[in-house]
Image (spheres, rainbow, N blue to C red):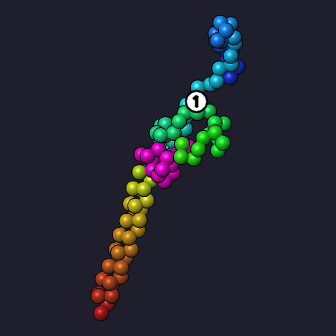
Amino acid sequence: MVCVANSLSNYRNIGGKLVYQSTKKRASGPKCPVTGKRIQGIPHLRPTEYKRSRLSRNRRTVNRAYGGVLSGGAVRERIIRAFLVEEQKIVKKVLKIQKSKEKQATKS
């Protein structure tokens, strides 16, 4: 059994000679840590090929919040959750103010 990293394959070069070439492992591409899905719009490369010198910034990322790290669905979910949490805080505050007003009205 051969290790995938050390695998070789036969190639016929221009002169018609059979030559061994080491094959690169297939890249699975970046995945979202939340959903586990592939991130759209980013090429599937080996980790070393994402370095600054080999790939420009606009090819390494996606133009949105958490671009290139989280998938679009995960970002949408986070934004909605944050919005709902803020709404809940506002509702609690309003209820607290109403309750205090009712207490003052019953006292006087």
Q: Secondary structure at mark 1?
A: loop
In the rendered structure, the answer to whether residue 66 lies left or right of residue 53 reads left
Is residue 38 visible in the rendered image? The answer is yes
Depth order, front residue of 26/49: 49
Tell me what residue is drawn at x 43 percent, y 59 percent. 82
How many numbered marks have been drawn onto this rendered protein structure? 1
Q: Quadrant of the N terminus?
A: top right
Is residue 3 visible in the rendered image? The answer is no
Quadrant hosting residue 50: top right
In the rendered structure, the answer to whether residue 73 lies left or right of residue 18 reads left
**Which region of the structure is painted magenta?**
60-75
Depth order, front residue of 32/96: 32
Residue 54 vertical placement versus 106 (above, below) = above
Rendered location of residue 92, percent (x, y): 38, 70
Tell me what residue is drawn at x 53 percent, y 46 percent. 58
The disc labelled 1 sits on which kind of residue?
Answer: Ala
Quadrant hosting residue 93: bottom left
Residue annotated with mark 1: 27
Rendered location of residue 77, percent (x, y): 41, 51
Binning the other alpha carbons within 10 Å of mark 1 as few (below 14), some (14 to 19) or many (20 upward) gives few
Quadrant hosting residue 10: top right
Residue 106 vertical placement versus 65 (above, below) = below
Residue at the farthest front position: 15
Tell me what residue is drawn at x 37 percent, y 65 percent. 87
Helix, strand or loop for the magenta stretch, by majority: loop
Depth order, front residue of 52/108: 52
Q: Quadrant of the C terminus?
A: bottom left
Rendered location of residue 95, percent (x, y): 34, 74
Tell me what residue is drawn at x 51 percent, y 42 percent. 32
Rendered location of residue 13, percent (x, y): 65, 12
